[in-house]
Image (cartoon, grey):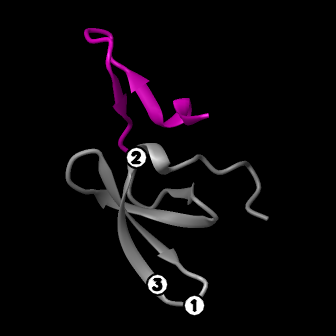
Amino acid sequence: MHAVFVRRSASRKTREPRKLPRGTLARYRNRIVEVLGEARGERVMIRSIHDDGIERRTAVKWTSLLPLSTELF
């Protein structure tokens, strides 16, 4: 399931997270989030709206992001 966001280097056998373009929508836990950009290490900054209605920016691991299906609803 995470293979969509991961690429395999031809010269190395390690898995590297693929850098998603800014503004891409993805799923993180039970929320749909917007990718804001790369953070430290293997993390990415996301923007999401929580249950209390407050917009939050959070750094999460690349592997925690899941691709959206073709439909939002």
- Residue at x 50% of width, y 74% of height: 48
Q: Which mark is residue 52?
A: 1
Total marks placed: 3
Element type where label 2 sits in the image: helix
- Residue at x 31% of width, y 51% of height: 43
Q: Residue 44, image x and y in percent?
A: 33, 55
Which quadrant would the C terminus be assigned to in this image?
A: bottom right
Is 55 rendered above or below residue 14?
below
Q: Residue furthest top?
A: 11
Mark before the other along the chain sequence, 2 or 3: 3
Which region shows up in magenta? 1-19
- Residue at x 38% of width, y 37% of height: 18
Spatial separation of the CA atoms under disc 2 and disc 3: 20 Å
- State the image quarter where residue 52 is shown: bottom right
Q: Which mark is residue 55?
A: 3
Spatial separation of the CA atoms under disc 1 and disc 3: 9 Å
